Image: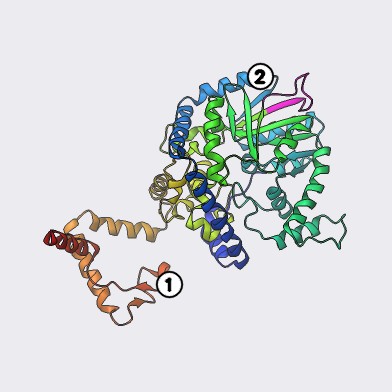
């Protein structure tokens, strides 16, 4: 029942995405809709860079003492009348959730947005047990109708346009007037709201994710812009929080600092429209809320990252800024990455969770331009971590033999500077001579991956080292 990754087919996925004209138009919204808003929000907050340092330090401190904070969180949840369940892997998490739903005699489950729910494939598992899980986030609802994965961690349906959504609504909402006007986005939103309102009221169990779990109080925090998360946890008799181990933070003060960088990095807002704190089931004096409160905390390979070179990835607060600024994501979208987590953060996290043999292609899908690291609110060195995965891939002989042979050939020269300089001078001179008429090559031996899609410019003469040496000499003469 878990989600089957197609990450090993990244190249094929990317090729299809590049040829999809509709997708390419939709991906333009990522560049327009997120980058400028984040820049404006950061510029409007003078202490933003200091907050990023603080957010990094909070997460580092928590990861160094993760066992203690998880124990403290569990104590506080129990003290408030709730239950905490620790799941070692996706299968165990699914079984725990199913048992809770069965105990409630659940037929309909209202779901708030949760990447962990996607990671463990909970929807298909509940459906196989005869239950009806309904995504209540608008983007998640749309892709559920299409039987697709999210293509972005904060904007799941960013790869679609309004006409596609209209087509899906007409296909699924057959009980509504066939002549209704759905030509405007606001009409699509109104229809989704009306359909989902019935599901909220019918739900026996609500499942939400968690942006943070606060050890100090046993509180779970979610941030949304639609309010669906609130309805998913307040109206049903039982509320299940689904989160991974690294979501815990020590105090409410720490959570508030992280919230200040989260929304600004994600959507350019000072805060999301709704920031909801939940602590245990309904108390006698409460006017609403669930009768039962369960928290399922998933490991699924994360504890194996602690104490390794990949521990820094566990700082991630799922803002999506790295993919919003990534030129590779802009070109191929999220589905090309072939699993739950796309973009630079997915290129690091996916191999850690499903194995470098299944996710090893993803760290190679990077220009190493550094934009992802420059905007990360918790300063994760994503290019460095992708390099680590490339090294692991090479060590395990997962890269193609031709690539390994080529790297060994290059390394032979790189370890011998004099020979390297001689070889590059001869090579650049020969290419400059051969390409002097056209100024470019339509094909070159060993460069088919480049020349298949674009011409290779002919060198203008001289190597980089020669040009650099010449420029330095010129500066000395002028001084």
Which residue position is annotated with label 1?
A: 454
The span picked out in magenta is 279-294
Does residue 287 sit above or below 109 in this rendering? above
Left/right placement of residue 267 relative to residue 58 reads right
| Picture residue at 70% right of the left edge, 33% below the top | 97
Pick the quarter of the image with the C terminus.
bottom left
Residue found at the very far top of the displayed protein = 79
Q: Position of residue 50 (x, y in %)?
A: 43, 36
Q: Position of residue 240 (x, y in %)?
A: 70, 31
Left/right placement of residue 79 relative to residue 300 reads right
Left/right placement of residue 188 relative to residue 148 reads right
Disc 1 element: loop
**Distance Cα–Cα, label 2 vs label 1:** 61 Å
Pick the quarter of the image with the N terminus.
top right
| Picture residue at 54% right of the left edge, 36% below the top | 260
434 vs 234, nearest the viewer: 234
In the drawing, what numbered circle is on residue 78?
Answer: 2
Whether the magenta-drawn stretch holds residue 291 is answered as yes
Does residue 426 sit above or below 282 in this rendering? below
């Amino acid at each position: 029942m878990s989600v089957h990754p197609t990450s090993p087919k990244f190249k094929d996925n990317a090729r299809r995405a590049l040829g999809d004209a509709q997708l390419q138009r939709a991906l333009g919204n990522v560049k327009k809709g997120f980058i400028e808003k984040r820049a404006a929000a950061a510029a409007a907050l003078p202490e933003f860079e200091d907050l990023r340092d603080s957010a990094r330090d909070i997460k580092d401190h928590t990861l160094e003492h993760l066992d203690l904070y998880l124990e403290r969180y569990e104590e506080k949840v129990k003290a408030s009348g709730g239950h905490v369940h620790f799941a070692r892997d996706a299968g165990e998490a699914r079984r725990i959730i199913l048992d809770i739903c069965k105990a409630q005699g659940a037929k309909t489950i209202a779901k708030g947005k949760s990447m962990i729910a996607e990671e463990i494939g909970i929807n298909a598992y509940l459906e196989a047990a005869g239950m009806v899980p309904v995504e209540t986030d608008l983007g998640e609802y749309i892709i559920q109708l299409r039987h697709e994965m999210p293509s972005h961690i904060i904007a799941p349906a960013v790869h679609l346009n309004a006409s596609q959504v209209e087509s899906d609504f007409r296909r699924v909402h057959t009980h509504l007037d066939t002549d209704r006007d759905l030509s405007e986005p606001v009409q699509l939103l109104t229809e989704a709201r009306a359909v989902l309102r019935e599901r909220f009221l019918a739900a026996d169990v609500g499942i939400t994710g968690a942006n943070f779990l606060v050890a100090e109080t046993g509180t779970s925090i979610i941030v949304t812009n639609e309010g669906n998360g609130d309805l998913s946890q307040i109206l049903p008799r039982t509320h299940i929080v689904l989160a991974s181990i690294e979501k815990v933070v020590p105090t409410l003060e720490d959570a508030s600092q992280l919230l200040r960088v989260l929304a600004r990095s994600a959507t350019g807002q000072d805060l999301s429209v709704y920031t909801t704190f939940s602590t245990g089931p309904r108390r006698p004096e409460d006017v609403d809320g669930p009768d039962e409160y369960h928290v399922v905390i998933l490991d699924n390979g994360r504890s194996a990252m602690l104490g390794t070179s990949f521990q820094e990835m566990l700082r991630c607060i799922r803002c999506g800024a790295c993919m919003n600024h990534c030129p590779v994501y802009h070109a191929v979208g999220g589905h090309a990455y072939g699993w739950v987590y796309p973009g630079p953060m997915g290129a690091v996290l996916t191999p850690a969770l499903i194995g470098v043999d299944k996710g090893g292609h993803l760290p190679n899908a990077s220009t190493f331009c550094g934009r992802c690291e420059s905007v990360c609110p918790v300063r994760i060195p994503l290019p460095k971590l992708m390099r680590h995965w490339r090294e692991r891939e090479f060590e395990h002989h997962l890269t193609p033999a031709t690539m390994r042979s080529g790297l060994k050939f290059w390394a032979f020269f790189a370890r011998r500077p004099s020979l390297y300089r001689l070889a590059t001078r001869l090579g650049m001179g020969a290419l400059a001579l051969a390409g002097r008429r056209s100024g470019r090559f339509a094909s070159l031996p060993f460069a088919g991956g480049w020349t298949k899609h674009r011409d290779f410019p002919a060198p203008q003469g001289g190597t980089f080292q020669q040009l650099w040496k010449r420029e330095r000499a010129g500066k000395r003469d002028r001084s």
